Amino acid sequence: MAPQHITFIGIGNMGNALAQTLHKAGHSTTILNRKRHRLQVDKVMELGAELEQDAEIAISRSGGPVMVCVLDHDAIYKDPRQGSIVLPGKQSSTSPTAPLCLVSSS
C-alpha cells in the first residue's frame, strides 16, 4: 500500500497502537484527542504525528482513512467542542459497551 496521510481521532490504548503501527509503516498521521497531556498522545507525537485540536481540520488533513477510536458509542454523537466527534463509518463492534473504532474514507 502506498503511504497515506491518516487521521486518528481518539488516542487511547487502541488509537495509540493503530497510530504508532501505521506511522512506523510509513504513513503520516494527524491526531486529535480530547486531552492533549496524555502518555499515548505523547508517544505518537514523538514519532512525528501532527496534533490538531479542531475536528474539521483534522479530518480535512487526511488523504486517506479517518480512524475514530473511542471508548463508547455516546462519544461519537456529541459536539466535538465538548470533546467528542460525530463521524459516519463502520463500527468494529456491535456491543454498546465495547470500545469502538470507526473507519471512514475522507
Image: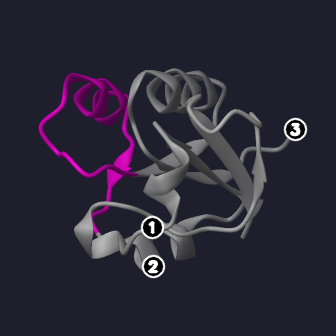
Tell me if label 2 and label 1 are in contact, CB under 8 Å: yes
Q: CA distance from mark 3 to mark 2?
A: 26 Å
Which circle marks residue 58 in the picture? 1
The residue at 28%/28% (across/down) is: 46
Percent from the top left, x then y, of residue 58? Answer: 45, 67
Q: Nearer the viewer, mark 1 or mark 3?
A: 1
Question: Which structural element holds mark 1?
Answer: helix
- Left or right for 38, reference 26: left
Kindly identify the amino acid type of the residue bearing the numbered disc 2: Glu
Q: Identity of the amino acid at label 3?
A: Met
Where is mark 3, residue-wise? 1
The answer to whether residue 79 is magenta is no
Q: Could you tell me which quadrant the N terminus lies in?
A: top right
Q: Position of residue 91 (x, y in %)?
A: 75, 46
**Local SS, label 2:** helix
Looking at the rendering, the stretch of residues picked out in magenta corresponds to 32-53
Q: CA distance from mark 2 to mark 1?
A: 6 Å
Q: Earlier in the sequence, mark 3 or mark 2?
A: 3
Q: Residue at x 30, y 36 (%)?
A: 45
- Residue for badge 2: 56
Q: Is residue 43 magenta?
A: yes
